Image (tube, rainbow, N blue to C red):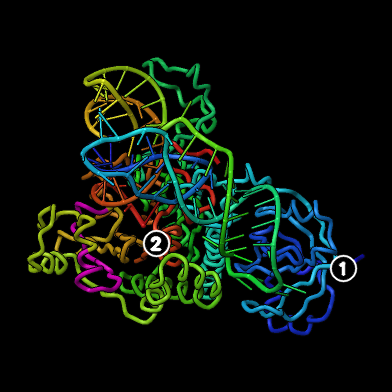
RNA sequence: GCUUCCGUAGCUCAGUUGGUUAGAGCACAUGACUGUUAAUCAUGGGGUCCUAGGUUCAAGUCCUAGUGGGAGCGCCA
């Protein structure tokens, strides 16, 4: 019995038609079993595809006790003839000759059933939810998007750059940070002033998990030209929303000699490439999600790849909001940071299209953004998507050493911590740009999921790190 | 962190102005059916109505606190 196992996805290819009539072996988990006293139908899934293979077992050929143990969630090895299906709903099926039960899934304790689970319930059993159709689809898409990101950048001559995850810069400005320490929390060493003595800590100073790889990414761009980072990012914000995670993955390209327009062109092309890649390479999974959760998903994806994003200055956006006559909870005024309601109005009601907003007031944006000649605005760009909001945040970077230094002093930054960063402007400074794309936010858009906790296998958010 | 809604069977949910023994679908058990498609049909078992306290003749239902979850907002990707 040295039959070679085939993956279930291979049974649905054109090539598989040549296998009809031959003996095959499949292994997987039972999704459903149904039938009558003569025949049992087992839908088997091995994770290679959203599609199940139908295993047909004539009851007389199998031990009654074995068939009883074949329940939703049980794992099997099945040998049988691949045949054209006698029933409707599938082209081929396996007429089983031998079934080996790897592991039972006790129906009284196995929480997954063949019907109707809420996302909230599945979040409580996050260790088992990858076995559902929905999470299988989402996680396969997640893989494909990660792969496509590397492929896109590699094909365009970018280099994958590894910014550190542990950093000593205690105020990168993007949010609260998780501290990294090996000091004994029950017995912290103190210095003469009574403060914690971090010189005794692992790195000899206080350290944190990164909130962005950008500053180090700029060192890459200003040396090997075009780089991107793609790694985990950590923010200790007490954020309780369907769009935030404490641990998430971010893609941060950074390009020497790119101005803000080059930056926007790249961002738009990049997102469209990824969406197109999903439509072409994750067809079955996207169609499943479209069918089960949101039947406008595919239309929405097609819309994005076939329309130019609206490009708009912050000041024009304010004018549109003011002229709209729409009642907002927070009154619109030049200089304010746009609220969600304002962004959503622009994207979902006014333009009905992704929008790239640029040239924000400098006060509401980060210190490193290139200052415009008007003295009031900076060359920031935010890409805003329907439902999701900000999917990308980026800018052209301030390349002038003097302007950057002045700005950093203005807002009271500790310059000592940033000497290495300032050196990019002291020595051979160049115009450059970059942005950050939230990987999970992209996945929200591509999968149609509505909560970011459902597009990552093990979500991290306040009070939740169980699995 | 703020605001707001929700917590009833293993899962998804219904439960009227407070009123007898808390219901349905799925799941599970038994039976029926020669090929099903989240199979169907019949019968059956299954409940700390989130927890604690309170109001009331009477609480799943009303009040208070706690706890868990969702959504909106803020922070941002």
Q: Is residue B69 left or right of residue A58?
A: left
Query: Residue A441's x, y, as percent?
Result: 41, 59
Q: For residue A399, say whether it is visible.
A: no
| Residue at horizontal 72 percent and vertical 74 percent from the top | A93
Which chain is home to disc 1? A
Please tell me the numbered disc located at residue A264: none
Residue A205, percent from left and from top: 46, 31
- Residue extent of the magenta highlight: A345-365
**Residue underneath mark 1:** A3
**Does the magenta segment cover residue A258?**
no
Quadrant occupied by the C terminus of chain A:
top right
Front residue of A318/A117: it is A117
For the N terminus of chain A, the quadrant is bottom right
Determine the image quadrant of residue B67.
top left
Q: Is residue A367 above or below residue B46?
A: below
At 21% from the left and 45% from the top, the residue drawn is A410
Q: Is residue A437 visible?
A: yes
Q: CA separation, marks 2 and 1?
A: 64 Å
Q: Chain of mark 2?
A: A
Helix, strand or loop at label 2? It is loop
Report crowding for label 2: few under 14, some 14 to 19, many 20 or more residues within 10 A (C-alpha): few
A320 or B50: which is nearer to us?
B50
Q: Nearer the viewer, residue A50 or A310?
A: A50
**Mark number displayed over residue A428:** 2
**Which of marks 1 and 2 precedes in the sequence?**
1
Compared with residue A210, is residue B64 higher up or lower down, i.e. above or below? above
């Amino acid at each position: 019995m040295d039959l070679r196992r085939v993956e279930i996805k291979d049974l649905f290819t054109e090539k598989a038609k040549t296998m009809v009539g031959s003996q095959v072996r499949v292994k997987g988990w039972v999704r459903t079993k149904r039938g009558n006293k003569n025949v049992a139908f087992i839908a088997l899934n091995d994770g290679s595809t959203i599609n199940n293979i139908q295993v047909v077992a004539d009851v007389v050929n199998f031990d009654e006790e074995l068939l009883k143990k074949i329940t939703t969630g049980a794992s099997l090895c099945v040998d049988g003839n691949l045949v054209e299906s006698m029933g409707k709903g599938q082209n081929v099926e396996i007429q089983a000759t031998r079934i080996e039960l790897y592991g039972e899934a006790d129906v009284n304790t196995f929480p997954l059933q063949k019907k109707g689970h809420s996302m909230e319930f599945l979040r409580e059993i996050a260790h088992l939810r990858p076995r559902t159709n929905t999470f299988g689809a989402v996680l396969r898409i997640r893989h494909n998007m990660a792969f496509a990101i590397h492929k896109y950048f590699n094909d365009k001559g970018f280099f994958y750059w590894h910014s550190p995850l542990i950093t000593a810069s205690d105020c990168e400005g993007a949010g609260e940070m998780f501290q990294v320490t090996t000091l004994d929390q029950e017995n912290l060493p103190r210095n003469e002033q009574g403060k914690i003595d971090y010189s005794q800590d692992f790195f000899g100073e206080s350290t944190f998990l990164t909130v962005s790889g950008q500053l180090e990414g700029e060192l890459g761009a200003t040396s090997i030209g075009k780089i991107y980072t793609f790694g985990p990012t950590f923010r200790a914000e007490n954020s309780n929303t369907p769009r935030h995670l404490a641990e998430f993955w971010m893609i941060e390209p950074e390009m020497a000699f790119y101005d803000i327009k080059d930056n926007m062109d790249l961002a738009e092309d990049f997102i469209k490439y990824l969406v197109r890649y999903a439509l072409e390479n994750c067809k079955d999974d996207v169609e499943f999600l479209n069918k089960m959760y949101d039947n406008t998903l595919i239309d929405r994806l097609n819309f994005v790849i076939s329309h130019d994003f609206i490009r708009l200055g912050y000041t024009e956006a304010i004018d549109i909001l003011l002229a709209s006559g729409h009642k907002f909870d927070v009154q619109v005024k030049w200089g304010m940071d746009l609220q969600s309601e304002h962004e959503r109005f622009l994207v979902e009601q006014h333009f009905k299209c992704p929008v790239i907003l640029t040239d924000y007031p400098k006060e509401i944006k980060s210190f490193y953004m290139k200052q415009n000649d008007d003295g009031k605005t900076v060359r920031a760009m935010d890409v805003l998507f329907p439902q999701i909001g900000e999917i990308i945040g980026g800018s052209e970077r301030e390349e002038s050493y003097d302007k950057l230094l002045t700005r950093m002093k203005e807002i009271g930054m500790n310059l000592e911590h940033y000497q290495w960063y300032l050196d990019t402007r002291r020595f051979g400074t160049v115009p450059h740009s970059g942005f950050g794309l939230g990987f999970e936010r992209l996945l929200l858009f591509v999968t149609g999921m509505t909560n970011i906790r459902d597009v990552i296998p093990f979500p991290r958010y306040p009070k939740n790190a169980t699995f």
